[in-house]
Structures are given as structure tokens and as C-alpha cells.
Image (spheres, rainbow, N blue to C red):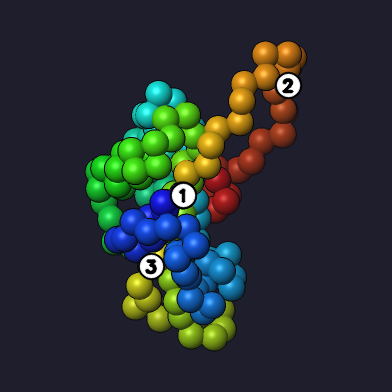
Amino acid sequence: MIVFLNGHFLPEAQAVVPLNDRGFLLGDGLFETVRVVNGRPFRLAQHLERLSRGADFLKIKSPFAPKEIQRIAGELIEKNHLHEALLRVTLTRGPGERGYSFNGDSKPTVAMTLHAAPPPDNHIEWSLITSSFRIPASDPTM
């Protein structure tokens, strides 16, 4: 499988993230998982908008604009010949010093991976439940 890591397409086994990457150590980052149908990521622009809002909130500056990520995602799909897949876009704060605080000058990590989509199961029964529990609009996790 070919993956994308920090500006490079490379075999998955060669994709290496430093042990001091804050995403690896502290979960300091975010990701979006997108369904790929007929070679096209479904609603990718909306996923990238949510990723951008989350990155802004966390003060992580992506080295790639959303349009560039869309282009890279298309190229990754073609390189892997996976037209029915799951695309994961991951953005972390990148490598940093030990400790929880950061000085804001880190180099973010951007990774994109593809995984074959699970086969459809036409025997699944679906039901919908609407929760009455509301999360405050000011909740930073939303």
C-alpha cells in the first residue's frame, strides 16, 4: 500500500513518524475518515472544513491547503488503485520537546492512508434513535 506522509508518497512500511511526534505521544492532533466511492472521496470538502476548524481550534497550522489535500487524496487513490475505500487524513502538531506545553513552532505531521472498504452487508437492519441529551455549543470538543 502506498501512503502519503509529509509531502511524500511512499510504501507503508517506509512511512516513519518520529517517536517525539506529539500526535503519537499525546494524541495532539486530529483526523477525518472519508468513504471513497467510485474513486471519489464522499463529501471531502466538508470533511476538510471540519478538519480545518479543529486545527484552528488546536492552533495547528496544516502545511497543505484543503484544495491541495483534495488533489493529494485523488493521487493516493489512483496510486493504490482503490476506488472503494476508506481514506484517513491525519494532522498532528508534529515532533516536539518533552512535556505538555508547546512553543508553537513545531512542524505538523500530515499523513493520508487508504484501506479497502468492507464489503456491503445487505442483511443489516438499521434503526435510528434521537438523543435528547444536548451538548453545549461552547463545548470545545464539538
Mark 1: secondary structure = loop
Eyeballing the image, is 119 above or below 18?
Answer: above
In the rendered image, residue 124, in percent from the top left (x then y), is placed at 73, 17
To which quarter of the image does residue 49 belong?
Answer: top left
Q: Circle 2 sits on which residue?
A: 129
Numbered disc total? 3
Closest to the camera, between mark 2 and mark 1, is 1
In the rendered image, residue 44, in percent from the top left (x then y), is placed at 38, 35
Eyeballing the image, is 20 above or below 48?
Answer: below
Q: Earlier in the sequence, mark 2 or mark 3?
A: 3
Q: Circle 3 sits on which residue?
A: 108
Q: Distance between the residues labelled 2 and 3?
A: 38 Å
Q: How far apart are marks 2 and 1 (CA)?
A: 38 Å
Classify mark 2: residues with Cα within 10 Å, few (<14), some (14-19) or many (20+): few
Residue drawn at x 51%, y 72% as measured from the top left: 22
To which quarter of the image does residue 129 belong?
Answer: top right
Q: Earlier in the sequence, mark 3 or mark 1?
A: 1
Residue drawn at x 44%, y 25% as measured from the top left: 37
Mark 3: secondary structure = loop
The three-letter code of the residue at mark 2 reads: Ile
In the rendered image, residue 9, in percent from the top left (x then y), is placed at 34, 56
Q: Is residue 4 left or right of residue 118?
A: left
Classify mark 1: residues with Cα within 10 Å, few (<14), some (14-19) or many (20+): some
The three-letter code of the residue at mark 3 reads: Pro
Q: Which of marks 2 and 1 is nearer the N terminus?
A: 1
Mark 2: secondary structure = loop
Q: Circle 1 sits on which residue?
A: 1
